[in-house]
Image: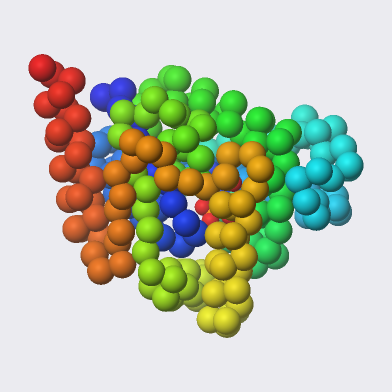
């Protein structure tokens, strides 16, 4: 297996995870959904009635709870894709619910949470190559990633995709709710003080508004081939 680290960042519901999974499968590399980790921490906080931070200067001591949070990924034998396990329970579906989506951006501003998750993410990349998607993967987690992509798509396309994804999971939601949540998270994620979402200088932009999944995979694989040529010369 190649020790190739690919970072895929971008706005909410751009289709990052779909591309990342397809690329990982093609290359035989693990796929890591860093957003799922922020969602799992959020789920833990919500389940334990820990207050939602109203800004990143919150006085509440969130740090004291972090030792009680164990996050792992396990491969689902039905689809071969890694799913997130919080304190021994598979929460892959639960973390996608609106209850979590509504406050994940706020919990993601907490320095202690980011520090803990970035450390876990870097350890995963130290062992082997991987494909990881998120908001700060190319800028903070793996600033020396072999390949970095920054994904974007029109607001309309993104809202429609997220809506269809949630409907497919059987969650009751309106298009309006989806749109409002996307706008809110994009704003929060790109304006927070620590590790805001931004395009790394050396990232390749992938606007997939008008691309199907095969075209997106081909787009990324073209750069993988180029990377292979560069490392072999
Ligand atoms: O990828 P996602 O939409 O499931 O991510 C959920 C939230 O987690 C996102 O709104 C912001 C936060 N996040 C983050 O702050 N940093 C990351 N690397 C990934 C996600």
Q: x, y percentage for residue 38?
A: 62, 46
How many labels were placed on the picture? 0
In the image, what residue occupies the spot 17% across and 50% down?
A: 218
Looking at the image, the residue that sits furthest to the top is 233
Q: Quadrant location of the N terminus?
A: top left
In the image, what residue occupies the spot 60% across and 69% down?
A: 181
Nearer to the camera, 81 or 121: 121
Q: x, y percentage for residue 154?
A: 38, 69
Nearer to the camera, 204 or 173: 204
Q: x, y percentage for residue 167?
A: 50, 76
* Quarter of image, res 187: bottom right
Give the left or right position of residue 146, taking residue 124 as reference.
left
* Quarter of image, res 128: top left
Q: Quadrant location of the C terminus?
A: top left
In the image, what residue occupies the spot 37% across and 29% down?
A: 145
Give the left or right position of residue 135, taking residue 87 as reference.
left
Q: x, y percentage for residue 56?
A: 76, 45
**Viewer can see residue 90:** no
Q: Is residue 168 above or below residue 7?
A: below
Q: Is residue 39 above or below residue 172?
A: above
**Viewer can see residue 50:** yes
In the image, what residue occupies the spot 26% across and 24% down?
A: 2
Nearer to the camera, 89 or 203: 203
């Amino acid at each position: 297996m190649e020790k190739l680290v690919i970072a895929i960042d971008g706005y909410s519901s751009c289709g990052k995870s779909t591309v990342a999974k397809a690329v990982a499968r093609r290359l035989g590399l693990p796929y890591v959904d860093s957003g799922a980790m922020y969602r799992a921490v959020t789920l833990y906080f919500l389940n334990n009635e820990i207050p939602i931070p109203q800004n990143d200067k919150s006085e509440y001591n969130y740090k004291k709870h972090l030792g009680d949070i164990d996050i792992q990924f396990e491969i689902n034998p039905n689809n071969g894709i890694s799913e997130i396990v919080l304190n021994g329970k598979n929460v892959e579906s639960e973390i996608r619910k609106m209850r979590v989506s509504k406050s994940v951006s706020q919990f993601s501003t907490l320095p202690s949470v980011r520090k803990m998750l970035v450390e876990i993410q870097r350890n995963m990349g130290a062992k082997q190559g991987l494909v990881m998607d998120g908001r700060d993967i190319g800028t903070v987690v793996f600033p020396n990633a072999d390949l970095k992509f920054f994904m974007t798509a029109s607001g309309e396309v993104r809202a429609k995709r997220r809506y269809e994804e949630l409907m497919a999971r059987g969650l009751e939601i309106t298009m309006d709710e989806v749109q409002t949540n996307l706008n809110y998270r994009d704003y929060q994620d790109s304006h927070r003080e620590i590790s805001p979402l931004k395009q790394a200088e050396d990232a390749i932009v992938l606007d997939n508004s008008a691309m199907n999944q095969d075209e997106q995979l081909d787009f990324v694989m073209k750069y993988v081939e180029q990377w292979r040529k560069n490392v072999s010369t």
